[in-house]
Amino acid sequence: MNRRTLISALCAFGVTTVSATAASAAPPATRATITVFAAASLTDALQAVGKAYTARTGVPVRFSFASSSLLARQIESGAKADMFVSADQVWMNHAQKAGRIDAGSRRTLLRGRLVLIAPADSRVAVRIAPRFPLAQALGANGRLAVGDPAYVPAGIYAQTALTRLGVWPSVQTRLARADNVRVALSYVARHEAPLGIVYETDARAERGVRIVGIFSEASHPAIDYPAALVRGASPVARGFAAYLQSPAAKATFRRYGFRTFG
Amino acid sequence: MISVAIHRTLGAFDLDVAFDGPADGVTVLFGPSGAGKSATLAAIAGSGPIDRGHVALGSRVLFDSATRVNVPQRARRIGWVFQDARLFPHLRVEANLRYGMKRAPKAAQRIDFDHVVGVLDIGHLLPRGVRDLSGGERQRVALGRALLSQPELLLLDEPLAALDGGRKAEVLAYIARLKADFALPMLYVTHSPDEVHAIADHVVMLDHGRVVATGTPAIVGGARVGAEIVGRDEHGVLLRVPHGDVVPGTTLDLTIDR
Amino acid sequence: MLTATEWEVLALSVSIAGRAVLFALPLALITGWVMARTRFPGRTLLDAVLHSSLFLPPVVVGLVLILLFGNDGPIGEMLARFGIRLIFTANGAALAAGVMAFPLMLRACRQAIEAVDPRIEAVADSLGAGFWDRTFSITLPLAAPGLIAAAVIGFAAALGEFGAVITFAANIPGETQTLALAIYAALQQPGGEAVALRLAGISFGVAIVALLSSEALLAYGRRRSGQ
């Protein structure tokens, strides 16, 4: 293209970029949307609840699902979220200590269970008990798919449970550590790993896996999902927080396999 | 004896060239720019396609469209010198010289390394890199490299065109030496009448892709210069001819206008 | 100066990035040559496809790799018959990093080949050198500086690659936990910034060493060819 066309193209590009930046920097208060940061394992359930809420009130709800550690960090650095739902108390404590949480609004929203899963067509049979032969069940090359025990709540629970059962040392070097529990789930569903440890709710949502066993609640701290408003949340967000405690929402959560309170 | 008959469609016109050249000595392809001289060389070398025709070196057929003979370029035993030397920049002078020599069949080795180096006066350049050679030095190395590949025919495509006046004369003298020392037919392309008169044994004139005349160098008109009488001795008149490209020993035909 | 864990992570990173370059560079060279020297219908489309890992999100590339090379994937199944498993292994991490680094190496290789005057190759032909002879005696030596640059760029890109590696190879300390993954994991933990910073410094150091080595190599090459 000749020089003039090139220059006009560059100008058009520059103008577009500048105006797009200006538009996205518009204060969010002028648009009534609720932004919720939530742990990945809540994806399906929360989206259903959010849709119901929008149908009722006309207020759109935007979700960002990721590992709780990442979300806590983002909130810590000032991300514009209205609400945080974490997969454990640790990361909620972290965000609260950083002064970003409206402590008065904090509630324990849900409780979950930890399960051992295998691919749907696998015929492995393992009973979860003290010192159960988990390493042998993995076979010669197989790895146990888990969320990274260094920072993913599901992984931390898994390590705790396996440690209390006396099994951790035998599988410690045989893990496939995923960045979030959904990825661990897909490793098992796709036969990349013969066994995995995820939340019961994740296992129920994925048809490619079946539950081999359920970890007793004695083997790990309670898997609690705390929810709280972020400081500076828009007033509309309080409505959503209240809705999460409503019978309708609780019924939806229970349908996905969570336990609710009250 | 070189025997060439080439028909090829170029862009602006067709190349339709047929001529024979002597088995040794220099045949010059002469004509204006764009006459098809370089394309003819490319066709003979095997790097340019020929639609139909026939190229033979003595009894060796290199190309024949009727019998579907097409010897690949690297097997034709033809050396090629360009106006921009095209030396291998990552090799030293000696490695450049030996490149073709190493790849020529053992049986054909008759042109000797030291002989060529001696004739072209490039012995002192052997260990040098190629980057800082002068234009004239480069062309001499290029000539040596082509010669040492043991060719049966040497193609020279306007070898002096990129050189300035003094260098032209110098390199032309070396080419004359090569002609004297090695019994090798050469096909030399130029549009300069002075080079024709300096080196040609036989001339083929080309224009618009066709042969328009063949013969001795006399068929090419020379340049007109004004000469000045600067003295007289018992043998005749002494003349100053102000034309730097004329090589000492050249015979001039003078027409005296009063 | 460095802890034992840090040495292990560093050594693993360098090994994986090195393997990535080893596997991607010949491919980049061949495709670069094809792109530089040939014309055929669909060439532009092929060019776009070869560059796709440049504009796709790295996690998506990781997922595609799982689809192809995972235990259920067509290539994965074929390799499994020879006892080769790539997913969750260091070689798998190298594959993921190599795929992400490939477009950069391809560009550099292509430019390196394009910089070699085809007329010089034609001269070599007239002097009796066939295609492979020419390629090894003329084209590759002349393209060498550009090819070294391609290797260095590829190494740097592979070293820093995160999304595709963690998706395809997971985070396995001692097996696939490269510097990039280790930095990420450190940052995920409360108070892990100090560790992350140290690891980032080590990454930077490796990149500098790679750059200086390539400069030294180029200078040596230049001296050897008498320039």
Image: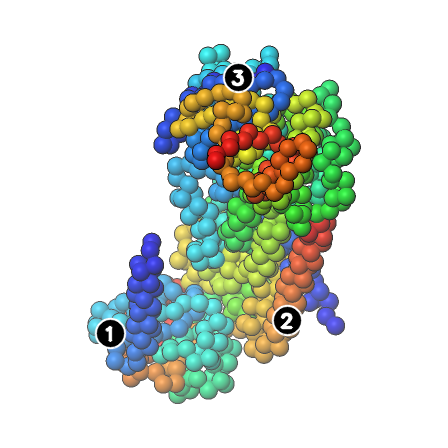
Q: At 47% from the left edge and 66% from the top edge, which residue is drawn?
A: A113
The chain identifier of the residue carrying mark 2 reads C
- Name the residue that disc number 2 marks: C201
Q: Secondary structure at mark 2?
A: helix
Q: Is residue C224 above or below residue B97?
A: below
| Dots 3 and 1 on the same chain | no
For residue B106, side relative to residue B21 (left or right): right
- Name the residue that disc number 3 marks: B20
Q: Secondary structure at mark 3?
A: strand
Disc number lying in front (1 or 2): 2
Tell me which corner region of the image, top left, top right, bottom left or bottom right, holds residue B77: top right
For residue B149, side relative to residue C105 (left or right): right
- Name the residue that disc number 1 marks: A59
**Camera-nearest residue between A19 and A259:** A19
Q: At 58% from the left edge and 57% from the top edge, which residue is drawn?
A: C153
Image location (x, y in percent) of residue C157:
56, 58
Q: At 60% from the left edge and 72% from the top edge, which residue is drawn?
A: C196
The quadrant of the rendering that contains the N terminus of chain B is: top right
Q: Secondary structure at mark 1?
A: loop
For label 3, the crowd category at 10 Å Cα-Cα, with few meaning under 14, some 14 to 19 and many 20 or more, is some
For label 2, the crowd category at 10 Å Cα-Cα, with few meaning under 14, some 14 to 19 and many 20 or more, is few
Q: Which mark is residue A12?
A: none
> Of the residues shown, which amino acid type is indicated by label 1?
Val
- Mark 3–mark 1 distance (CA, rounded to whole Å): 93 Å
Q: Please say if the residues under marks 3 and 2 sit with CB atoms less than 8 Å apart.
A: no
**Camera-nearest residue between A115 and B182:** B182
Image location (x, y in percent) of residue B186:
60, 25
Q: Give the image's coloring scheme.
A: rainbow
The chain identifier of the residue carrying mark 1 reads A
Q: Is residue C164 visible?
A: yes
The chain identifier of the residue carrying mark 3 reads B
